[in-house]
Image (cartoon, rainbow, N blue to C red):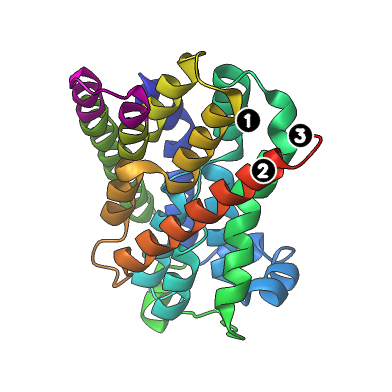
Amino acid sequence: MLWFHTLVPTLLPFLILSNLLIAIDGIAYLTRFLYPVLHRLFGCSRNGCFCLAAGFLCGYPIGAKLAGDLVREGRITLEEGNYLLTFCNNASPAFLAGYCLTDSLKTPELLLPTLMLVYGVPLLLALFSRRGRSFENLTAENKTSRSQISFKIVDVCMMNGLESILKLGCYIILFSMLARLLIRIPCPSSSVTYLSVGLLEMTNGIALVTSDLSLPVLMRYLSVLCFLSFGGLSGAAQTESMILDSGLSFWNYLKAKLLTTAFVVCLAAGYFILPGH
C-alpha cells in the first residue's frame, strides 16, 4: 500500500520526466540558476546539480538512479557520479516532516534541527571529500541524434520509469516481509528487535520504535534519525539495483552512508544532552 499510494503517484511521473530530460539533454536548462551556487560549493557540473537537487528533494533512491543514468548516458564522469552518490541519495523532506516527525513521533517542533542534521551532515561531508575537485558538463557526441523528442524516446523513457518503480515495489515488499519475520523472532530485548527491523527496512522500523511509548523520547528520536540517515538495507538494495552496469561503487556509497549515520546520531545525542534541551 505504501508503494501504491505514495511511490507510484509521486515518483513514477518524476522518473519518466527525468529520463526524458536526460535523453534530450535538457537538464542544463533547468539547473542554470542552481549551477553557480552548487558548482562553487560542491564542484558539480550542470547535470550533476540536477542529480544533487533531486536526490535531496525526492527521496531514496532517486539520487542513485539519476547518478547511474547520467554516467551511463555520458552526461557526467564516473568520478563525479561516485562523488555525488556518497551524499545525494537521501530520504525526502516530505517523508521526514510528514510521516516521521508529525505522524509517528508527534514532534513537528523538531523539524528544523532534524533537517539540519539529516541533510546538513552529508553536505558537510561532501565539502570535506571534494578535495578541490571541480567537474564540468559533458555532452556525449554519440547521443546528439536523440536531441529531438519522438514517440520512440518517450516510450523508452516510460518503460524505464515503469521498470524502476516496479523494482522499488518488489524490494519494499521483500524487505517488509523480512521485517515482519524479524518481529516474530523471540528476543530478550525489544530494543534489539527495533534496531534490527529499522536497519533492515526503515519505514517498518520507524513505525515500530515510535509506537512503543515506554521508550524515552530521545531514544525514539535517535532511532528514527539512524534509520532515516542509513536508509535501511532495503534502501541499499534499491540503490544497488539503480546503479547496475554504471560502474558506480556501491561499497563507497555504503561506507559513506554508515559514516553519515554515525555523525548524525552522535551530533543529535550531543545536541539534546546539552543543558536546556
> Which label number is shown at residue 97?
1
Measured Cα–Cα span from mark 1 to mark 2: 9 Å
Q: Which residues fall within the magenta stretch?
A: 178-194
Q: How many marks?
A: 3
Residue identifier under label 2: 115
At label 1, the amino acid type is Ala
- Magenta span: helix, strand or loop, mainly? helix
**Residue sitting at x 43%, y 76%:** 144
Of residues 162 and 118, the one drawn nearer to the viewer in this rendering? 118
Name the N-terminal-most of marks 1 and 3. Answer: 1
Q: Taking 272 as reference, is 212 above or below it?
A: above
Q: Percent x, y for residue 181?
A: 18, 23
Residue under label 3: 277
- Residue lying at 56% horizontally and 82% vertically, measured from the top left: 135
Q: Is residue 31 left or right of residue 67?
A: right
The answer, for residue 77, to whether it is visible in the render is no
Question: Relative to residue 167, is residue 158 drawn left or right?
Answer: right
> At label 2, which amino acid type do we have?
Leu
Q: Position of residue 190 (x, y in %)?
A: 34, 22
Count neighbours of disc 2 (C-alpha within 10 A) and say few if under 14, some if 14 to 19, many if 20 or more: some
Occupied quadrant, residue 123: bottom right
Residue sitting at 55 percent across and 40 percent down?
92
Which of 259 and 203 lies nearest the eye of the viewer?
259
Front-most of residues 128 and 263: 263
Q: Quadrant of the N terminus?
A: top left
Residue 235 lies, in percent from the top left, at 35, 44
